[in-house]
Amino acid sequence: MRRSLTAVPVMALVVTGLTVPSAQAAPQAAAPPPDSSFQKVTLNDFPGEPIALAVLPDKRVLHTERKGEVRVNDPRTGENVLAATIPVYKHDEEGVQGIAIDPHFSSNKWVYVYYSPVLNTPVDDPATPTVNEGDAPETGTASDFARFKGVMRLSRFKLSGNSLLLTTEQKILDVATDRGMCCHVGGKIDFDGAGNLYLSTGDDSNPFQSDGYAPIDERANRNPVFDAQRTAGNTNDLRGKILRIKVGGNGGYTIPRGNLFRPGTAKTRPEIYAMGLRNPFRFTVSPEGVVYVGDYSPDANTANPARGPAGQGRWAAIDKPANYGWPYCVAPDQPYVDYDFATKTSGAPFNCAAPVNESPNNTGKRALPPVEKAEIIYGYGASAQFPELGTGGIGPMGGPAYEYSAANRSQTKWPKYYDGKPLLAEWTRDYVKGLTLDRRNQVTAIEAVLPSIVFDNPMDLEFGPDGALYVLEYGDGYFSENPEAQLARIDYVRGNRSPIVAVQATPSSGAPPLTVTFTSTGTSDPDGDSLRYAWDFNNDGVIDSRQASAVYTYTQNGNYRPTLKVTDPAGRWAAAEVILPVGTAAPVVTLVAPVEGQPFTFGDTVDYQVTVEDDQPVDCARVTVTYILGHDQHGHPLSTASGCSGSITTFLDAGHAGADNLTAVFVAEYTDTGTPPQSGSDQVVLTPSTD
């Protein structure tokens, strides 16, 4: 077990209150609450590759895993129940992305999910180890690229108890994608106070052959994925946008008043609320309809007069429909330079006051709206305007603003001190900042929020109905369940603290009948209270033992997550679980080649060799190897191959900024045919050659 609960005294944030155009913020407390007033409680220590969360009215927490799993953390039992496994296409960054509940969830039980349906997209054939049929070609004809046309899909499903019923799917909106090549699918879902649904979409463009500047490659034989003008800069395309719709019966939708383009306007999509975004991966909408969004940066470390500005992340408070400029401008005064990829010559800087999309891949209007400036723009180095943001990678996440309610009787709700402050989470820098805005939604102060609490690659944040902050953390690693990954809740403590839970299981796996001894050694209560124990060994929701230690015999195969919930006399609780496979053994996967630290040069074709040891017959067709570009603390999956042996060509981009921080990551995975199936994986990191 990695951890079950962390109680950390923290330093709190000293800022003034937020005022939004439609409501006057309440006066703020003169001083922050004491450092000892917050506690971080782990809810799921094994969340898979965590992507998004949604807190239900009864404090259950839905959370998604990119490869298809949707789980429910149930406070009644402390368990993390598998609600559904959605079949998804998984090349590059695709998979399950956003999740949200309907504003009227208590009565209609609708859950919204943004995901990549499987379709008939080509995948790698393990019988041809020297060719990866799942990678789209970089050059070719329209017919060559057509086979990789796909969609990201916004649907809604009914939640019945802790089960997400896939048979109830209502398909709401498909967003076109070009599959088989990286990057940027976006995928957050949220609602405003009027019930309008907002969806963020990435530019679905490959940035890795643009030297860290704008990907605007217009060559006729190039895969259109190298041209972001076709998406983010296209008024007739849903990618690189914030969309706003009103969902009605049977999954249909209407267009609210006040989007960027009136319905019926030629060469436009009326769903667009904001355009010119690169990868607006996380945002939150205030009840008044202000969209707090973080937009991911290009990669150039330094500005180039012949190409444009250095990479910069953006945070915006979008309170009106607007064009944010990508791929033409970072801000009204920061244009990129028109660049001919065929001749490698630069033209003039783009006109941010009146940008024009002349790409042959553009299906929308030629003349675009003027570029709007984001409230925060920052780069890799120290910002003169926003020094509080520090230095490092660039991964802004638009988090929620806390809404304090005196009527909320929760004992864990955050104090009034934080009322109205939007949170900016930095995925690469492992922190959360609080923002003070004026009446025009301009940032007037930035301060650290709970700097002594660990936010390890914060992936998604949401305040629950109890006023506590729920956090999904990705951890340090690439496209897998990292050791630090978790779903957690951060409470403001009034009175008792939650217990700290630890569990052990001996043995940790085996064939049935399997007798396992469970102990709670290391479990404690910060207040010294007596504790009540509740074990569920077989995940049926029924308490099997109320002792601190117990023995249980498993008679059937299964992937079990035995859970211990511990409660103090005040009703404060915490839970911990272990992963316990009963039946067939998990396969041992080894990347024989390449090896850890192996030098390489981008553009090299790297041969791989994978061995699998298992108690079931090994089928090499079930082995997948993914090549990931590691950049700072995050990564971009660029290619996935199948088979125990083969080769993958690493991308060539000598001008990619931040080259000192680039690595090539190879991840091998295998799932066997046992009952139930078991999985194993291995990972190696290659180092770019300095020769």
Image (cartoon, rainbow, N blue to C red):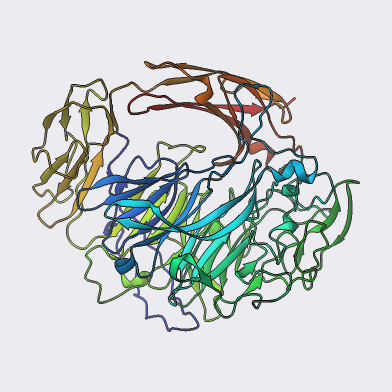
- Report whether 429 appears left or right of 24: right
The residue closer to the viewer here, 61 or 222, is 222
The residue closer to the viewer here, 171 or 16, is 171
- Quarter occupied by the N terminus: top left
Image location of residue 598, percent across then percent down: 62, 21
The residue closer to the viewer here, 302 or 219, is 219
**Residue 234 lies in quadrant:** bottom right
Decide: is 127 above or below 462.
Answer: above
Could you tell me if residue 111 is visible in this image? yes
Q: How many marks?
A: 0
Decide: is 185 above or below 325.
Answer: above
The residue closer to the viewer here, 629 or 267, is 267
Image location of residue 591, percent across then percent down: 53, 20
Image location of residue 45, percent across then percent down: 33, 41
- Quarter occupied by the C terminus: top right
- Report whether 74 appears left or right of 154: left
Image location of residue 375, percent across then percent down: 60, 69
- Report whether 364 appears left or right of 400: right
Q: Could you tell me which residue is drawn at 21 percent across and 35 percent down? A: 503
**Residue 508 lies in quadrant:** top left
Q: Could you tell me which residue is drawn at 78 percent across and 53 percent down? A: 216
Q: Could you tell me which residue is drawn at 68 percent across and 76 percent down? A: 264
Could you tell me if residue 381 is visible in this image? no
